[in-house]
Image (spheres, grey):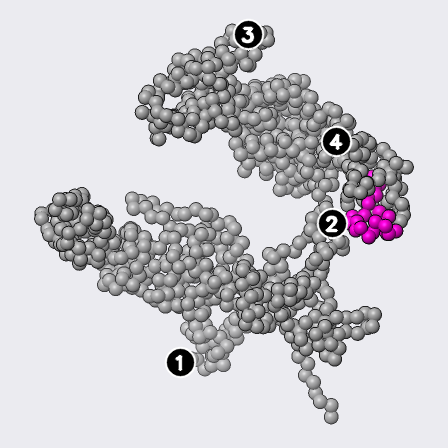
Amino acid sequence: MVHQDLKEFEGKLPELLIKQIEEICPASKIKKVAKMALKEYESSKIDPGESVGLVAAQSIGEPGTQMTLNTFHFAGVAEMNVTMGLPRIIEILDGRKTIKTPMMEIFLKSPYNKGKGIREIAMKLKETKVGEIIHEIQINLAELKILCHFNMDKLADLDLKISKVADSLGKAKGVAKEVKAKVEGDIIVLKMKEEGSINELYKLKEKIKNVPICGIKGIKQVLPVKRKEEFLIITAGTNLKKILELDFVDTTRTISNDIYEIAAVLGIEATRHAIIDEVFKVIEAQGLNIDIRHIMLVADTMTVSGVIKGITRYGVVSEKASVLARASFETPIRHIVNAALTGETDKLNSVVENVMLNQAVPVGTGLPGLKVKTTKEK
Amino acid sequence: MTEVFLNGKFAGDVENKDEFIESFKSERRQGGIHYQANVSYDHELDQLMIESSRGRVLRPLIIVKEGIPLLTDKHIKQLQKNEINWTDLVQQGIIEFLDAAEEENSLVAFREDELTPEHTHLEISPLAMFGLATSLVPFGDYLQGARLIIGNKNLKQSVGLYTANFPQRMDMDVNLLHYPQMPLAQSIMHELSNYDKHPSGQNIIVAVMTYKGYNMEDAVVINKGSIDRGFGRATYYRPAISEELRYSGGLMDQISIPDKDVKGYKSEQDYRLLEDDGIVFPEAKVKEEDVLIGKVSPPRFLSSLDEYSLASNIRRESSISLRHGERGIIDFVAVTENEEGNKLVQVRIRDPRIPEVGDKFVSSHGQKGVVGLIVPESDMPYSAKGIVPDIIFSPHGIPSRMTVSHMLELLAGKTGALAGRYIDATTFDNEPEEALRAELVSLGFKEDCTEMMYNGITGEKYLARIFIGNMYYLRLKHMVANKIQSRARGPIQLLTRQPTEGRAKEGGLRLGEMEKDTFVAHGASLLLKERFDSDKTIVPVCEECGLIAIEDYVKDKKYCPVCGEKVEINDVEISYAFKLILDELKALGVYPKLKLKAKY
C-alpha cells in the first residue's frame, strides 16, 4: 500500500524508488523527499537526441585499445586456458557461435559446497572415454579380437566397475553392432561378430577408444576451486542443460560462458545478462573502468530481436533501415544491388546517410524541427 | 649415419659426423675449402648442413684451441708493423667466418680472460657484436638494448658533414651542419671510422632541469645565444633539374624564357629572375612559385590535321618553379648534357636552417626531443662559475627510459672538457665511472656532477643542485621548415571536388571517420555539416522523375532531361560526392530517385 503523499509520483518515479522513499523517510517529510527525488531523477535522464550508441561505442572502444592480447592461465595442477582481453570481447560482441574456450562455473548445493566429496563429484562430471582409462590395447589378428587391458586404479578413481564399462561398450553407437564384449578379469575381450578385414579391425580399435563411458558430454576438464569459503567446480567445455539436471547443482547460480548455450537453455533475457556479465568481467580483469550502462546498451541491441545478433554485417548491421548506411559498412556492392532489385527507399533517418548527403544529422542540435501553428485569419 | 645437406639439398650420408665436421673445418682453415662455406649440425634432426649460398651474414672470430687463442702477440706485432694483414690471418687459419648456424655449434668467449678449454672461438673485440653506428654510442654497455637501437637509428638521421665535396655535388634533399665537432666522450670506433672526416654533432652543455614547463614531454629548451654562436646551424640543399627532351617528329623542348603566347604562361613577375638563357642567376633569392628554369614544350597531342594548322604552333609552358612553401638562395647552376645528349640544367637551391621551435635534437642514447622554447641567454639559468647551459633537458625523460649512459656521458663530457682531453667511452671497455668522478673532484667540481645554479630571470638560487655537464648532441634532419602546413582555402580534386591531400599539394587536413564521430557524440550536428561543406553543391532536382535536372544559365530556365520543362524543379543542397555516386549508380543501370519533401 503506497503512502498517500506518494500517490501523485506513481508513474513518474520508478516503483523501486518509491518503495525506498517510503521505507526510509519519516511520514512528515515524505512529500518533500519525493519531490527532490523526482527533480534529481528527471535531471539524470538522458536528453532526447543524445547519441547514446556512439558514446557507448567510443566508451568501450577507447579503453579497448589499452587491452592486452594475453590469455590468462589458472595456476595449479590442472591448468586451464581462458580467453581474456580484447579477443574475448570481440568474440562476445561479434556473437560467435563457437567460442575459443567454453567454460562453466558450477555452484553446488550444501553440503558439497563446503568441500565434501568435491573431487569425486568433479571426476564424475568429466567426460571420460575408453581411451583414457585403458592401459593397453592388444589386437589378435588371427581370431579378430581386441583385448583391452584396463587401468584398474583409474577405474577405481571413477568409481567404475569393469562390467559396467563392458556394458557401455556393448551399447555404444557404431561399436555395438560389430562386436561382442566379454569381461575376463582386468581385460575386456571384444570379438567381431562378422568376419571382417584387418583394416576394419584397426578402425574399430580407434572407435573403441572414443567411446564415452561416464561423465557429461562436452566437459573436457574439471577443476574444483575454493572461492570465498565456498567450493565450486570450474570446467572446460560446457553442457549447461545436462549439468542443470543434476540434483547436487545449485541451479540458480551455475552458469556457462557460451552465450548461445544460455540462449538455448535459459532464454534471451538470461542471454542479455550473460553478455553484460561476460563483457564486464573482461573489463574488470583488465583494470579498466567502463560504465556498465554502455555495455547494457550493446547487450540490448544484440538481443532485442529475441535471438542473438552480433555487431557484424550479418547481425545488427544487416537490420539497419538505410541502404546507404549498410553500404557504407562492408560489402557495399551487395547492398546496392539488392536495393536496386527491390526498389528500396532510404528515408535518411540516421547519421551516416546524412553525412554522405551533407545534411544535418538528426542527433543533438540537428534533431528538433520547427512546427508553426497557423491560425486562420478571420 | 647422418644425412648431409648441401645448401638445403640432400647430398648423401656420413658415417662419423664429428670426424666429418672436424675435417671440414680444418680443410677450410687450410684454404682447401672456401672460407665463406659453413658447416652446422642439428642435434634434433641428426642432420649436417653445409652452406655456401649467398645472403648469409658471416662474423669473423678468433679460433681457440685448448683454451688458447691462435692469435698471438707475435701476430699483433706483425700487424702493427704492417707485415701481415687481415687476409693473411684468414689464410693462416687464425680467424674464421661463422654464419648464424655454425655459431650455434660453437662456444664463443666474450673476452680473453673468460676462455676455458671448451671454448672454440674468441670474440675479436666485444664491440664486434655491434654495427658501425651502434658502436659510436658512448657507454653503450650502460644502456638498455632497445634504447641502443633507437640511438643508432637517430644517429643515422643526424645532420652533419656527410661529404667534403658537397659543393661539387647535386644531392637530393641533404642537410649540412655548419660547425661539426668530434665528441668529447669517444669510442674507438670514432677513430677507426675516420669520424673526424665526417662528424655530425656538437659538444654542448646540458643541464638536467625543468624550465617553466617548456621542456615537458621530451621537449628541450635551447639557449638563443648558443644558436647565434652557431649551435645546430645547418644548410639545406635541394636541386631543381630539367632537361630538353626530344619528341617524335623532330620536336623538342626549349630551355628559355617562355613567350607570352605560350599556353600556361604564368606572369612576368614569376619569370623575373631568369637570365637570357632561361635559367636563374646564382645568389638569387627565390620564393615559392618563382620559376628557376624556364622551359617550353611542344603540344602534348599532335593529330595529323593539327600539323598544318596554325594552332599547332602553340607550345606549352613546362618550367620548373620552386614548390609551394619553399624558399632559398640559388647556390649553383650547372648546364651539361645527359647520357642521351640532351641539354641538362641543374640548379641547386640552398636554404639556411637556423634551429627553431619544433626542430628535432637528440643525444646518442635515443633521447630525442623537439625544441620547445628558445630562451635569450640572459634568461637562462647560470652556475656559480657563470656557465650557461646550451640545452635544458627534462629529468622526467630518464627514469622510465633507463638511459644511464646518457648521464654517464654528461659526467665524462664535463671531465673531458675540464681536463682538456678526450674520454674513452667505448662500449664494454670504457674509463670507469669512479675514476671520472675522482678526476672531476680534482678539477674542483662536485663528484656527482651537480652544481649550484641561479635562476636567470630573478637571480634567485635554485633550491636543488642541478646536474650539468657536457655532451654530444645531434640535430636530426626532421625540421619544421620541411613539414609545416596550413590551409584555409586551396586546390580541390577534380573528381570529387573535395580538398586535395598532402602537403605537397597544399592539401587540407582530413576530418576522418573517428573525428566525425566526436561531433556526433557531442550532438553538434550543424557544426558537423559545416565542416563537411567543402564539396557542397546546389543541384536542381526534377520532382517528377527524381533525377538531377539541368539549369540553363543563358536562357535562365531549368528543365528535366526526361520530363521536359513542364515539371516542378527544385534546388537541393547536397555534397558533390553524393551527386557523383548518383551518377555512378546511373552508369551502372541503377535508377536512383530523389523524393523531395519540405524539411519543416
How far apart, in angstroms, are the residues tagged by discs 2 and 4?
A: 35 Å
Q: Are marks 1 and 2 on the same chain?
A: no
Residue B336 drawn in magenta: no
Query: In the rendered structure, the residue with mark 3 lies on which chain?
Result: B
| Nearer-the-camera pick, A225 or B119 | B119
Residue B62 lies left or right of residue B184; in this view the side is: left
Disc 3 designates what residue?
A: B77
Give the residue type that dot 3 points to: Lys
Disc 4 designates what residue?
A: B339
Give the residue type that dot 2 points to: Glu
Name the mark nearer the viewer: 1 or 2: 2
Q: Is residue B130 visible?
A: yes
Name the mark nearer the viewer: 2 or 4: 4
Residue B312 drawn in magenta: yes
Q: Of the residues under marks 2 and 4, which one precedes in the sequence? A: 4
Helix, strand or loop at mark 1: loop
Magenta stretch: give its range. Answer: B290-315
How far apart, in angstroms, are the residues tagged by discs 3 and 1?
A: 109 Å
Helix, strand or loop at mark 2: loop
Name the mark nearer the viewer: 1 or 4: 4
Q: Is residue B581 visible?
A: no
Helix, strand or loop at mark 3: helix
Disc 1 designates what residue?
A: A1
Give the residue type that dot 1 points to: Met
Disc 2 designates what residue?
A: B506
